[in-house]
Amino acid sequence: MNKVLLTPAKCALDMGDGSERGLYVNQDYILQKLKKVHRGISLMYTYYPNDKEWPTRACEIDTGHESRGAWDSPYENYFPYRGGREGLRDGEPFNFMKEIRQHGMDVVLTLTIDPHLKEEDIIPIAKDLRPYGRVLLRVNHECTGGWFCYTRRATYQEIADFFVMCCRVMHKYAPNVKMILCAGMYMADGKLEMEDIFLEAHKAADIWSGDNYLSLHWGWPNDLVSKDTHNYARYSVKEVYEKCKLTYKRLQKITGQKKPMVLSELNADGDVAGPFAQSNMMKEFMELLQKDKEKWLSAFTFYQFRDDGRLGLEITDPNNSEVGIEQPIMAMYREQLHRDFFTQNMKKGESFTEFPVTLRWGGSEDAEGVEVPVKLSKTPVQFELHFPSELEKLNMMIEFNGWWFYKAPGTKYVDLMPYFFESKNAVKKPGTFKLRYFLPPADGMNCPQKGCKPAGDPYEAKDGDWLYNYYAELPALPEIALLERAVCIKATKCIK
């Protein structure tokens, strides 16, 4: 038997899940819709603990006048981040972060933060994030713009200096956290917007980023797209693509560094030209990426899974916010998500001869699993994994021929038959398929010692391998219930 190593895709895909424009959707639902995990799930929160209105959500604050725009409030209208100074680590976003990691993905967290907070205010946030493995943290994104509330509180130089300070704090107190700077893009004069002001911030960041929309109705929800309104635009996909690529090259030149480049928000807005144009524009962008011989983009985040407007794979049902209405872009995106270009690689790892075996989970781009060959001569009529008592407690991600399935602690069986429900996945000739098992953190958190609980306070424990890796033991393989023809029960007529 062999271990298998999960390694990065040529270009990773992350998924936005919840923001000012929509509620968080649970990972089981997203997995059932897309049949595959992302590298990471992007969450968006805000932190202004010194404000008198805090922690009321911005849209619920009485400003004394009718709203004039999405950010016409004391602070950004994301859900409040209740960790940090308050120390509420048993609510949101922490429960969502745990669920994301249980489902084999990394946390991509965006925080808009009062830029006048001090280092002692940021240290508790760093400690909050220590047990969550390889977190990607984006602070005060789109910081060269003028629409977010924090840009009305500080100069751009103060915002740049604040980001550098946040980098310094995270690197010291939470070295597992990588900092994303989402700043100005390439302009017609050959420079980046405010590149001099943000130069040191670009140097301090671990990852460079930009937000780009192929079309966008920024007047939402205050107006409608029409010939009488002007709060929307549609851009050339090729021009946006080239602008993003030139941004990366310019960043390398002005910093003398080479770092990963991501697009932390990318989509086309169905409000502007309709849902079919939305799908076609995003497909064009993704095809350009795959044809480009220069592999310059590390990842991008599709914004977002379910949206109250028309920026989602689903739009929120106006009758019931718990229901999503699938858009044409869903099928297109799912097909692209399953392509090799956007799929983590699986490499053969070390061999082993007996169980139990210890598996390491470093993250969605760096993990050990166990690979099992399954021989099929025809499309089965039953294909289930059964977990005896010694395996019931395991938290497991299962990959079968490109499709992913989740097994929660306590689950006794997982049905793999949905893979064959699609006609293209029918077994046309006998062959060997690969079934792979991975063990991400059972409660979504890393712990300071192998073997875990109790193992001390993960928020205060000394730095070490535990910050980056979670270890779990696989005692044995699940039992496979596989039938390739119907089984006749006594006194029942069976059609073969």
Image (spheres, rainbow, N blue to C red):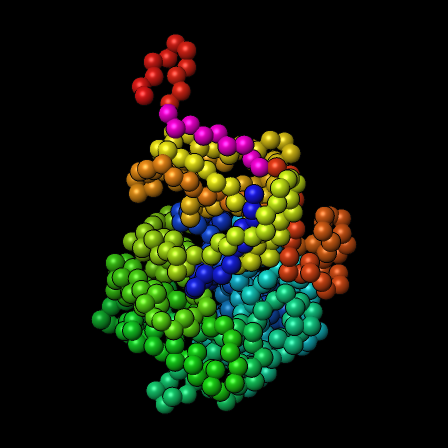
Q: Is the C terminus in the top left, top right, bottom left or bottom right quadrant?
A: top left
Q: Which residues are magenta?
A: 477-485
| Relative side of 404 to 331, left or right | right
Front-lying residue, 225 or 325: 325
Is residue 258 placed above or below 319 in the rendered structure?
below
User: Measuring 34% from the left and 49% from the top, which residue is drawn there?
Assistant: 325
Residue 300 is inside the magenta segment: no
Residue 8 percent across, percent down from the top left: 49, 61
The structure residue drawn at horizontal position 51% and vertical position 78%, both measured from the top left corner, is 258
**Is residue 405 visible to us here?**
no
Q: Quadrant of residue 128?
A: bottom right
Q: Nearer the viewer, residue 390 or 43?
A: 390
In the image, residue 458 sits, relative to residue 319, either above or below, namely below
Q: Nearer the viewer, residue 465 or 58?
A: 465
Specify whether residue 377 is in view: yes
Camera-nearest residue between 88 and 49:
88
Asked if the stretch drawn in magenta spans residue 478, the answer is: yes
Residue at (41, 15) in percent of width and height = 489
Image x and y of residue 384, in percent: 47, 33
Query: Can you name the residue that lies furthest to the top here?
Result: 491
Q: How many marks?
A: 0
- State whether residue 175 is above or below residue 353: below
Question: Which residue in the rendered view is the most extreme toward the left?
Answer: 227
Where residue 86 sits, quadrant-wise, is: bottom right
Quadrant of image for the N terminus: top right
Task: Locate residue 301, reporting x and y percent.
Answer: 44, 63
Q: Residue at x 68, y 76 (%)?
A: 119
Provide residue 66's location: percent of width, then percent of height.
42, 68
